[in-house]
Amino acid sequence: MTTKADILIVGAGPTGLVLAIDLARRGVIPRIIDAGRADHRESRAVSIVARSLEMLDDLGLAQAAIERGVALHTLNFYQGTTALAEMDVTAVDSPFPLDLCIPQWQTVALLRERAEELGVTIEWGTRLVGQQAGEHSVSVELGHEDGHGERCETRWLIGADGAHSTVRETAGITRKRTDLKRGFILGDVVADWPLTRDRFHVYFGKSGLVAVFPMVGGYWRILASTPDDRPPRTPGLDDFAAYVAERTPLDSHVRDLQWSSSFVARESLADRLRQGRVLLAGDAAHSHSPVGGQGMNTGMQDAYNLGWKLALVATGRAEESLLDSYEAERWPVVKSVVEATSATTKAATGSTLVARRVRRHALRLFGRLNPVQQRLSNAFGEHLVHYRDSDLVFERWHESQARAWSDVACAGPEAGELVRDAYMETREGPVALRHILRTPGHHLVLFAADTTDSATLAAWRASAHEAMAGHGEVHVITRGHLPHDPMDGVFADLRSEAHNRYGVRRPSLYLIRPDKYVGFRGDSVDFTPVNDYFRALGARP
């Protein structure tokens, strides 16, 4: 007997679960399998950056994640007892200006709970054995924990099954691999250190680095580079104590080792993210050194980009060609992440005299330059990721004379850039723009500037709904007070915060994509480009 599934996701880690949730909340329930066990507690990835917290907020999970983790605000760098620099990670333009330290298994637990609430069932102990591509489906062979096999026909096969992806290998998608020849050990311990528990602490020694940062429950995570690429398979307390004693001024008496692991830093990048009906996301598509904490976050953002597009295609509301934009938008991003992480890892672990001197001087310089700190903070928080070159985004935006109430320094997000948050007023009280945009689908935001006439606003809103053609919601934001007659979807921006943050100087439109990037913006109330956008998207009502 052959089973059928519209979408089969292989891998129930953070990437696969974010994709499953995003599909399910759009009415598409995928099948998701994982070769592991439900009680597996992987703890390697511990950092959730600002952009991913915004994504979790969109899924209704950010507050729960923050309550389970430790909020970190700075990165402190030392050489011995000398403080080299303090990098502020709160300079990111985000409603979550922090880096959240939380064990990966806790992140997975939150995502699993949300997926199950939406009707997704995770099939543990089930692995993909092989696949054969057809014109309209992929025939996959599955193996179950009890030994029996299964044949499944799926319209779309998603590989979110990690760096050793069976989906990638059986699809014949090649990848470029590089061995950085850097060994690392990591583990969670208890230690009596007089360190502030709201920051990373990175120590550089002649033979490598030791990074320590706080974990929930009073533990410290230690990440230490090894002198060669042959770290111990299962690091013990003695290994961690030795590196702490050698490279830091901290007390080397560590105890209560909860978990440890070791690895050699390698990087890989798949040649493509889509091959017919097979798509790759997360570590299946790209993997690299953990330095910088970008791996899990980049994978979740892959899923966030793919989810709304796959849902439109799976429900017949868009042409299959829309999925080509997933690779077009994400492959340059993941390539830059791999390259940046490689360079950072080499710079951080370089042990020659020249490398140590360059690193020391660079950190001291960066620590004194606020613009550099702000850019690094936005890069660390993944706020510099954009799709400005995507064929899916465009704008008709012209320079215009600044109004007295406008902030001429702010040009607003361009098409292909991230949305910005702001607070507005309703009759019930203040509301955040990010919460207005939570409903799955596109959102058309009409900035009315000084227009407050009820008839005009109502006419604009009706035209906006017609242009959206069922693809999402319409929101009207006026700088004046709310109309006397209640009108749904109208918000007051009395302090001009939203208008200024979006660079609006006259009535304008912003069309927000489901992944919270600007799809189109125009500084006039002309709805024709909105129709053009959905035609370019290949979307149907």
Image: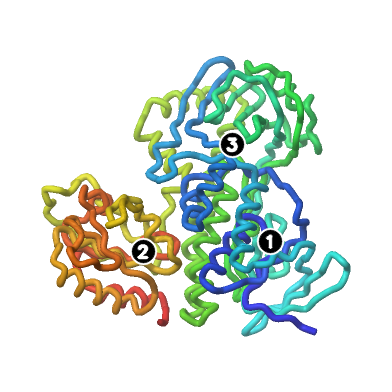
**Residue in the picture at 74% in, 66% down:** 123
Type of the residue with mark 2: Ile
Secondary structure found at label 3: helix
Mark 3 or mark 1, which has the lower sequence index? Answer: 1
Secondary structure found at label 2: strand
- Residue 106, given in percent of the width and then of the height, sits at 64, 47
Q: CA distance from mark 3 to mark 1?
A: 30 Å
**Residue in the picture at 35% in, 51% down:** 421
Q: Is residue 209 above or below residue 499?
A: above
**Residue in the picture at 40% in, 75% down:** 537
- What is the crowding at mark 3: few (fewer than 14 residues within 10 Å), some, or many (at least 20)? some
**Residue in the picture at 75% in, 39% down:** 261
- Towards the viewer: 41 or 352: 41
| Residue 254: quadrant of the picture | top right
- What is the crowding at mark 1: few (fewer than 14 residues within 10 Å), some, or many (at least 20)? many
Type of the residue with mark 3: Lys
Type of the residue with mark 1: Gly
The residue singled out by tag 1 in the image is 11
Left or right: 405 as drawn, with respect to 132: left
The residue singled out by tag 3 in the image is 346
- Residue 69, given in percent of the width and then of the height, sits at 58, 40
Left or right: 33 as drawn, with respect to 417: right
| Residue 368: quadrant of the picture | top left
Q: CA distance from mark 2 to mark 1?
A: 29 Å
Closer to the eye: label 3 or 1: 1
Q: Are marks 2 and 3 in contact (CB under 8 Å)?
A: no
The residue singled out by tag 2 in the image is 512
